[in-house]
Image: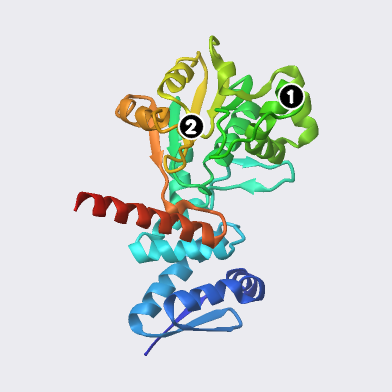
């Protein structure tokens, strides 16, 4: 048996690490099979030497976030545990100081994973960015955060959000109302993200002024978009022709972010995904960045990460059997 003690600056820091009713400590106990004892400003880790060492490294990486002023939760703890398994927990220290944008409620938005941080850096450094990965990795939300940040700073004059109007594996039939009412259900995730940063009233005013536009991809044809921050969401459901059309809308002083998940393509079987093709065609072109998220970057409920991992494993096994 081995024993290690981590000393905190004050009891408040230790309480932050422990979490609400010690949920963070329980996640650490379960992951490493160690005993964790708190006293005053100390955390004692007791267990097998290798597990104690790993747990201490995870704890110290979390302390770096707490020192940077971040309130950690079970998601942060799980992420620290996964990084410690790869020996890359030091990267967690880089996440504490990056504030992308402030929500309408005053909450600062930070990248929660190393993959998200690389995504933000890629957007800052390139005119066109492709963010590809599973559900729950923050692709759309962070893209909207960067768009709002650029708009508030005055580096762009408009925010344009678009996505293809493709039903997710089911036929919804005719929708009631005018054209806007018919397309709104497809664009709801984009509205939700904008409301979070701007609030419904500010969003409405900016939309009426033409500073914000949320529209189906078909509306982009024939336009040249200058001084705009343009986000194409659910891009896996674009055809190759739609993707080429969209990319050629780029005007002066604009940025484009394209997000999608190539495992959730809802196109007919005879149609090739424009996103899959674009990732091959655009690879290596200067000023175009491609970021691939993994299940480690999922920032939703723990089960979402488990589901993504299970599906990846299932498809990989299927490929192996087909090649046998």
Q: Which residue ends up furthest to the left in the rendered image?
A: 324
Q: Where on the picture, by quarter, is residue 196?
A: top right
**Picture coordinates of residue 183, whole percent (x, y):** 66, 27
Query: Whole-percent x and y of residue 265?
Result: 46, 38
Q: In the drawing, does residue 264 fall left or right of residue 69?
A: left
Judged from the image, the secondary structure of the residue bearing numbered disc 2 is helix
**Is 113 left, or right, of 155 in this rendering?**
left
Rendered view: 199 above or below 238: below
What is the count of numbered marks? 2
- Residue 4 visible somewhere in the drawing: yes
Q: Check the image and report above or below for 203 versus 1.
A: above
Q: Residue 91: x, y in percent?
A: 41, 55
Residue at figure coordinates x 52%, y 20% from the top left: 254
From this viewpoint, which residue is outermost toward the right?
201
Quadrant in which the N terminus is drawn = bottom left
Name the residue rendered at 56%, 24% in the picture: 229
User: Which label belongs to residue 295?
Assistant: none
Identity of the residue drawn at 50% across and 13% down: 252
* Residue contact between numbered discs 2 and 1, judged by CB atoms under 8 Å: no
- Secondary structure of the residue carrying tag 1 is helix
Q: Residues within 10 Å of mark 1 (few under 14, many from 20)?
A: some
Residue 9 shows in the view: no
Q: Is residue 117 above or below residue 254?
A: below
Residue under numbered circle 1? 206
User: Residue at left 46%, top 52%?
Assistant: 297
**In the depicted view, which residue is nearer to us: 293 or 34?**
293
Q: What's the CA distance linking mark 2 and mark 1? A: 28 Å
Give the percent coordinates (x, y) of residue 163. 56, 29
Residue 237 circle label: 2
- Name the one closer to the observer, 240 or 157: 240
Q: Could you tell which of marks 2 and 1 lies nearer the N-terminus? A: 1
Q: Residues within 10 Å of mark 2 (few under 14, many from 20)?
A: many
């Amino acid at each position: 048996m081995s024993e290690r003690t981590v000393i905190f600056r004050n009891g408040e820091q230790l309480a932050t690490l422990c979490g609400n009713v010690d949920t963070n400590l329980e996640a650490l106990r379960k992951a490493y099979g160690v005993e964790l004892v708190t006293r005053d400003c100390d955390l004692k880790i007791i267990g097998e030497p290798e597990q104690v060492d790993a747990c201490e490294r995870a704890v110290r990486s979390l302390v770096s976030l707490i020192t940077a002023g971040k309130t950690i939760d079970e998601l942060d703890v799980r992420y620290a545990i996964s990084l410690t398994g790869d020996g890359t927990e030091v990267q967690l220290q880089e996440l504490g100081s990056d504030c992308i944008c402030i929500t309408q409620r005053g909450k600062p938005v930070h990248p929660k994973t190393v993959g998200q941080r690389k995504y933000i850096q890629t957007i800052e450094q390139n005119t066109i960015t492709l963010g590809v990965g599973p559900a729950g990795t923050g692709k759309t939300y962070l893209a909207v955060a960067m768009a709002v940040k650029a708009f508030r700073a005055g580096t762009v004059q408009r925010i344009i959000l678009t996505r293809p109007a493709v039903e997710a594996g089911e036929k919804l039939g005719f929708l009631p109302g005018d054209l806007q009412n018919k397309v709104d259900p497809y664009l709801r995730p984009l509205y939700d993200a904008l409301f979070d940063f701007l609030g419904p009233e500010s969003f409405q005013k900016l939309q009426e002024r033409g500073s914000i536009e949320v529209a189906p991809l078909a509306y982009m044809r024939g336009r040249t978009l200058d001084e705009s921050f343009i986000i194409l969401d659910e891009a896996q459901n674009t055809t190759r022709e739609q993707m080429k059309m969209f990319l050629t809308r780029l005007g002066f002083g604009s940025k484009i972010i394209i997000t999608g998940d190539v495992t959730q393509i809802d196109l007919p079987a005879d149609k090739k995904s424009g996103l899959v093709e674009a990732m091959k065609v655009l690879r290596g072109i200067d000023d175009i960045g491609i970021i691939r998220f993994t299940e480690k970057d999922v920032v939703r409920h723990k089960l979402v990460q488990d589901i993504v991992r299970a599906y990846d494993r299932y498809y990989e096994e299927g490929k192996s059997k087909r090649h046998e």
